[in-house]
């Protein structure tokens, strides 16, 4: 049991878990920003060019609400496809932003690798290393065996 607790403590204290927690929190915040951008900026523009349509209100009513004596007995039952359209547009925006981030990251990573390759001096070839080893062995052993 002690080893299990020690393994768990080591797991919790690793940097990878902290990095993962930070990534999840940032992703949540970015998701909120993108949702707000979609709902508050993009959809009014799209709605304007689509004839002043508010997509979030678009629906197919399956059952109308039943009202008796001013009270709703049975609520409206509807397919809210407008909200789905908003979600799809949100997905497209998030996908595009992630694509741009990954593309920029890959470009920076490629440049970094190129710099590292340019800075690294070219080392000796395998044949050159073997020749050096052979020469060093000849120096150390002035009387090599007859079969060499």
Image: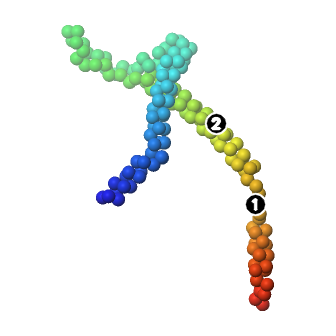
Image side of residue 25 versus residue 99, left or right: left
Question: Extreme left residue here?
Answer: 69
Q: Earlier in the sequence, mark 1 or mark 2?
A: 2
Gap between marks 1 and 2 measured at Cα: 32 Å
Image side of residue 98 versus residue 72, left or right: right
Q: Position of residue 71 (x, y in %)?
A: 22, 12
Q: Residue at x 38, y 51 (%)?
A: 9
Tally of marks: 2
Question: Does the rendering let one see residue 81?
Answer: yes
Q: Residue at x 36, y 55 (%)?
A: 6
Q: Residue at x 48, y 33 (%)?
A: 26
Give the mark toward the camera: 1 or 2. 1
Quadrant showing the C terminus: bottom right
Secondary structure, mark 2, is helix
Residue 122 vs residue 79, the one in the foreground: 122
Q: Position of residue 69 (x, y in %)?
A: 20, 9
| Pointers 1 and 2 in contact (C-beta within 8 Å) | no
Q: Is residue 49 above or below residue 137?
A: above
Question: Does the rendering let one see residue 47?
Answer: no
Q: Which circle marks residue 79 in the picture?
A: none
Residue 133 vs residue 103, the one in the foreground: 133
Secondary structure, mark 1, is loop
Quadrant of residue 68 in the image? top left
- What residue would you read off at disc 2? 104
Image side of residue 90 versus residue 141, left or right: left
Image side of residue 80 versus residue 126, left or right: left
- What residue would you read off at disc 1? 123
Q: Residue at x 77, y 75 (%)?
A: 136
Q: Badge 2: few (under 14), some or many (20 or more) residues near its Cα, within 10 Å?
A: few
């Amino acid at each position: 049991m002690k080893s299990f607790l020690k393994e768990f403590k080591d797991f919790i204290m690793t940097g990878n878990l902290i990095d993962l927690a930070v990534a999840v929190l940032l992703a949540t915040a970015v998701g909120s920003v993108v949702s707000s951008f979609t709902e508050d900026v993009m959809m009014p523009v799209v709605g304007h060019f689509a004839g002043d349509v508010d997509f979030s209100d678009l629906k197919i009513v399956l059952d109308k609400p039943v009202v008796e004596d001013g009270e709703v007995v049975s609520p409206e039952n509807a397919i809210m496809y407008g909200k789905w359209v908003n979600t799809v547009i949100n997905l497209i925006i998030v996908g595009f932003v992630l694509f741009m981030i990954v593309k920029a990251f890959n470009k920076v990573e490629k440049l970094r690798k190129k710099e590292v390759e340019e800075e690294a001096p070219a080392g000796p070839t395998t044949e050159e290393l073997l020749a050096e080893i052979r020469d060093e062995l000849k120096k150390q052993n002035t009387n090599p065996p007859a079969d060499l």
